Amino acid sequence: MLREVLAGYLRRVRAAHADPARMIVSTGFAQGVNLVLRALGRQAGVTRVAFEDPGYGRPEDDETVRAVLAMGLQVAYVPVDAEGLMVSDLVTSGAQVVVVTPAHQSPTGVVLSPGRRHALTDWARRGGYVIEDDYDSEFRYDSEPVGVLQGLAPDQVFLLGTASKSLAPAVRMGWVQAPAALAAAVADEKEMSDRGSCTLDQLALAHLLTTGRYDRHLRRMRLVYGARRAALTEAFTRHAPRARLTGLAAGFQAMAALPPGADETAVIAAARERGVGLYGIREFCADPESAPPALVIGYGNVRERTIDPAIAAVADLLS
């Protein structure tokens, strides 16, 4: 039941080329990407996987990258700029599959530009595969998000999604919309992995989707997170006007560049001493030492009223 409901939802909301026969229910994104890569290794001879940079970071900083290496696959890192993944660098990386977040890149917050979307699907049609992490697509506050990449090349793109961020992290429920030629292979990997996801959880999510409660929940939470995003933007304007806040009005985080030469680690430590938790961009990078200093500021789990005093407390560190 959930596969049929999800397929209809993804066609309606994300312009996906969705078919319940090619839908595999997983226990979240982490399992989904592992299932896909094992299937690609077994069926398509994939040996090298590319990740966005910044994105997942080094193996010692990220479980997904460690899991890929544990499968015996090689890892390549492809840079991201203001238009998203640099497809020209992907072409020269030697990777046969790439993991991307085109709707809202993590952690920079940029969206994959139309030109790059077409370049990436052209690369895939020449024999590559794309694993599309539809990250934060349901939480954009200024406009409707663009449709999924999978809708442009359903035979080469695996579309992965999860309810963990939209509902709660404890809800371990995700999905893989696989190309027709590889759906059975991914389903086989799922069966060998855990024999199937919890049926009760699947029925509960299907009920939320079919009754419209899921849509109502998302509309309400967009207002909550959008207000937090606006409060963060206003706080920067008021207390740190020289600091540049970047990233789409979407998701649960924004990025702020630090002045050239700033000590990112020292800024984070000083902020924590003042009771403000910040993250550095370098932990998301393949080569942290070469990354320009910047901060990743999360607002998903903080109350709106705490944002202004928090930014006021660290304003001197930001500029």
Image (spheres, grey):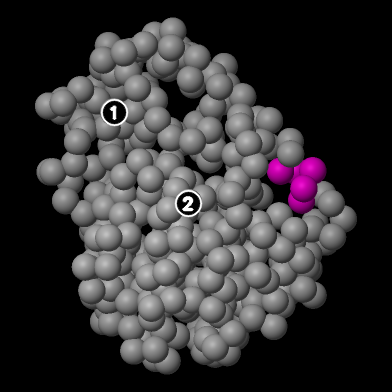
Q: Nearer the viewer, mark 2 or mark 1?
A: 2
Location of residue 211 by image quarter: bottom right
Residue labelled with disc 1: 257
Looking at the image, which residue sits at the far top? 238
Quarter of the rendering occupied by the C terminus: top left
Q: Main secondary structure of the magenta part?
A: helix
Secondary element at tag 1: strand
Q: Is residue 92 magenta?
A: no
Image quarter in which the N terminus is found = bottom right
Choose between 103 and 287: the one closer to the eye.
103
Residue 277 appears anywhere in the view? no
- Residue 311, percent across and down? 40, 16
* In magenta stretch: residue 216: yes
Mark 1 neighbour density, 10 Å: few (under 14) some (14–19) many (20 or more): many
Q: Which residues are magenta?
A: 214-218
For mark 2, what is the residue? 114
Residue drawn at 16 percent across, 26 percent down: 260
Above or below for 71 versus 308: below
